[in-house]
Image (cartoon, rainbow, N blue to C red):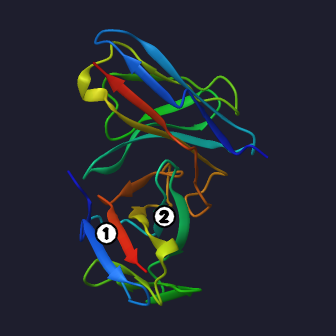
Amino acid sequence: QQQVKQSPQSLIVQKGGIPIINCAYENTAFDYFPWYQQFPGKGPALLIAIRPDVSEKKEGRFTISFNKSAKQFSLHIMDSQPGDSATYFCAAGNAGGTSYGKLTFGQGTILTVHP
Amino acid sequence: NAGVTQTPKFQVLKTGQSMTLQCAQDMNHEYMSWYRQDPGMGLRLIHYSVGAGITDQGEVPNGYNVSRSTTEDFPLRLLSAAPSQTSVYFCASSKGRIRNTIYFGEGSWLTVV
């Protein structure tokens, strides 16, 4: 059962464009929503994360928007660059109980930014 | 500062063979986990550990075994390899609470023929 659904599977934009990746979750117990960036041949690396008590978080050119009532969150990349070409994963987790570090991941989005 | 180290990087196994994927971290992290990554499936949790001597199953544990005898090491054993276990495997660690950053190793590419 896929508890976090991510779309689109792939995305191509021109340099300077604003790619948007969307995720939807089902488990209302989730209270931590990170995004990971993965380059070919490497492991995923934390990009930015949000908690459900805020609707938006920005770090540099990366912004997470969060809609708790719709159980959706999205990643926006402002002024995208060819170096942003990577696979992006959304994830969700529950900080309570014994859920140490347990994350449920979306299916991933392959982003290509053309020069 | 090595972070999370996985070995081997690449491995080809025959169906029915067993092997161990090694994972070590030098950050004194309590929490360690193994994920597998398959096209269109994202990363799925296989097993995890919240400390030495404590392990538990994740989403897809069948066919895998783990142990955590030290804080640093968390090996993943494939008991009898099957073609369905062809995947990229990632070990990860974090300090403990979920909102701490989870660090991933660089992956182990496993092919079962």
Please provide percent x and percent y for residue B65: 43, 22
Residue at figure coordinates x 31%, y 69% from the top left: A28
Q: Quadrant of residue B13?
A: top left
Q: Are marks 2 and 1 in contact (CB under 8 Å)?
A: no
Q: Label 2 belongs to which residue? A: A37
Q: Chain of mark 1?
A: A
Identify the residue at image location x=44%, y=69%: A85
The C terminus of chain B, quarter of image: top left
Residue drawn at the location 49% of the way across and 58% of the way down: A39
Whether residue A20 is visible, yes or no, is no
Sequence-wise, which precedes: disc 2 or disc 1?
1
> Is residue A10 found left or right of B64 in the rendered image?
left
SS label for mark 2? strand
For the point 46% across and 84% down, the residue is A80
Task: Using the image as rendered, state which of residue A85 and residue B83 is in the foreground.
Answer: A85
Disc 2: host chain: A
The residue identified by callout 1 is: A28
Residue A97, compared with residue B73, is above or below; it is below
Q: What amino acid is labelled 1 in the image?
A: Thr
Looking at the rendered image, the disc whose residue lies closer to the viewer, 2 or 1, is: 2
Secondary structure of residue under mark 1: loop
Q: Position of residue B81 (x, y in %)?
A: 32, 17
